[in-house]
Amino acid sequence: MAETEFPTPPGERSLIRRFTAYSLGTSLADFVYGAVFVTIFLGRGAEPWMVGSIMAGANLVGLLMEAPSGALGDRYGHRRLLFVGLLSWGTGFMLVGAAPTLPLTLMGMCLGTIGFALHSGTMSAILINRVGARDRTARIARIVRVGALSGRIGSALGAALVMVAGTWLPAGPLVACGGLLLLSLAALAPLSFPDAPGRPDRRIGVIVLESVSQVLSRRFAPMVALAMGAMSATVLLVASWQPMLLERFGQDVRLNGLFLLVMTLSLAAGATAARWVHPRRPHVWGPPAVIAVGVPLVLAAHGVVPLIVGLIAAEFLIGLAGVVAGVWHQLMFTDADRNTMFSTISTLALLAGVATSFGFGLLWDLWGIPIAVSVMASVSVIGGIASLALIRFFPESTEFTEAKMDDSDRSSEPESS
């Protein structure tokens, strides 16, 4: 059943429009990079096992930065962290696009990963922490869905840009253009979002410990399992689709853009479909979607279904799972530690991503892509099944009492910007 519709306050609508524009722009830049980064690595001398190791290394850097990044936002202000994250992310993409050697390319990738980790969760925190008590659950679900959908549309535009601009621009300059867009968004961030002063009186260590103790409790166990399964499925898809495309059709940047465009449209369709999931029942739809992601990917890897068909189906399921899991998370987070709790769960999910990317690269080098995809797809299946089982053991994981604002915040938080 879909959520109940309600009028959105004018100030909140304005802020959501800016949130939408930033989600679209950052995703556009990210997917220009995502369409060609494996091609760039291979073109600069990387072997298959190195591709998996490079991705695992970058994910590890992101993991180390993701853990404290939320606490930095909750203490010093989400808008300030958004600016720094976009600045680092854009600079990294500029370096990846212009680097003449593989080591410099890796350096740029790590810098971009750091920036992404710093920026992640900041825009959602800015909006959700300004949502008042009225219709809070439905409004949080709407913000998560709008952010996901606009991000998917931006991804599709990024893929289309690669498909068109790939006619006259090689992969490196395309990524550099994405970096320039991110730097422009960083410069505009102080004008686009309201000040979020944070709580400088709280120590970083205290904020992190509070969030970690909550996220590692039994109440959050099903969500953690689901997040790890979803991240594994996403990383596997990201790591495998370009090698499968190269293996079957050869190197053509325009074809990369075409495939990614179709895939991201399917991703957007999955995010849109989450509209019909009741905001208080994300735990019902998330685990089955994560369990099913690997099936079409494995079938495509073995040639049972056409590659594009398998990728479209997998992307749709990831789009659906991403939104409902995001709603589940945000309904459980507290306003005071929202960004930190987001980062804590993201850190745990990235552990599964690191293992998946490294395992895929190693198995690809040893036994080929089909077997690598088949083996690593089991990680997301295990995560989804574990989430379903833990929900039965810990029913308090679906009681969204933490969606309410802290009493100290309720009197001061405005309904809109």
Image: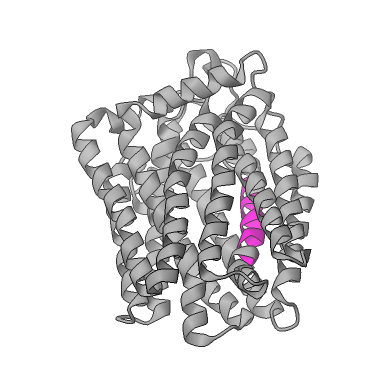
Residue nearest the observer in this picture, 194 or 367: 367
Q: Main secondary structure of the magenta part?
A: helix
Query: Compared to 232, does 268 lie above or below?
Result: below
Query: Which region shows up in magenta?
Result: 19-32
Q: Let me know if residue 190 is in the magenta part.
A: no
> For the view shown, which residue lies furthest in the bottom direction?
249
Quick one: quadrant of the C terminus?
top right
Q: Position of residue 319 (x, y in %)?
A: 43, 58
Q: Position of residue 408 (x, y in %)?
A: 53, 13
In which quarter of the view is residue 398 placed? top left
Q: Position of residue 226 (x, y in %)?
A: 34, 45
Left or right of 296 in this view: 80:
right
Residue nearest the observer in this picture, 227 or 122: 227
| Residue 224 visible here | yes
Q: Position of residue 199 (x, y in %)?
A: 64, 18
Residue depicted at x 32% and y 78%? 302
Left or right of 384 in this view: 268:
right
